[in-house]
Image (cartoon, helix red, strand yellow):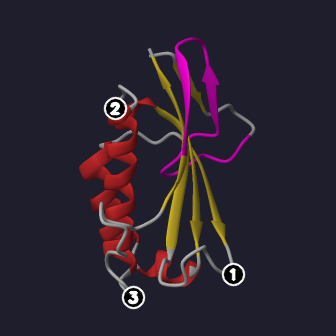
Amino acid sequence: MPFELLNPSGLESPVGYAHIAKITGGTVVHVAGQAPFDSQGKVVGKGDFVAQFAQVVRNLKTAINAAGGEPLDYAALTIYITDLQAYLNNKKPLGSVYKDVFGRHFPAITLVEVKSLYNPDCQIEISGVAVIS
């Protein structure tokens, strides 16, 4: 793997993410924020946080596959959400959806609540950095 995920002592024990993604080789690929749009540009799951999350992780998979990589090549993800409570209320189904695409791969992840996203019907957007060997 062209990067190493680290969780050094002295930092809290992470759940569902790694503290550090150390790039050691390969090609770095930046994936723009993926929103819950289908291939026609329509919002999937309007008003349904879990459905939107599912579309976003599928879009992340499609994007990295197009660059010649796999979801396990993501070293870092930044998650932007408009409703932290919706995220907290749906942690179990979100985890299930996440594992369908990423398995037990938990890169360096940052979660940020924002006031709004580009499209007002979108509740989530995720950008990523991947390293493909």
Q: CA distance from mark 1 to mark 3?
A: 16 Å
Mark 2 vs mark 3: which is more N-terminal?
Answer: 3
- Find residue 65 and report its image quarter: top left
Q: Residues within 10 Å of mark 2 (few under 14, many from 20)?
A: some
Name the element at disc 3: loop
Instruction: Note whether 29 is above or below 78 in the view shown.
Output: above
Q: Is 14 in front, or is 123? A: 123
Mark 1 vs mark 2: which is more N-terminal?
Answer: 2
Report whether 117 appears left or right of 62.
Answer: right
- Give the residue number, with chain letter if any, for mark 2: 70
Task: Give the mark count.
Answer: 3
Query: In the rendering, at what x and y percent does residue 99 appear?
Result: 29, 51
Q: Amino acid at mark 1?
A: Lys
Name the element at disc 1: loop
Quarter of the image for the C terminus: give it.
top left
Checking the image for residue 115, the label placed there is: 1
Instruction: Note whether 99 is above or below 90 in the view shown.
Output: above
* Magenta stretch, residue numbers: 11-31
- Give the residue number, with chain letter if any, for mark 3: 47
Q: Amino acid at mark 2?
A: Glu
Mark 1 vs mark 3: which is more N-terminal?
Answer: 3
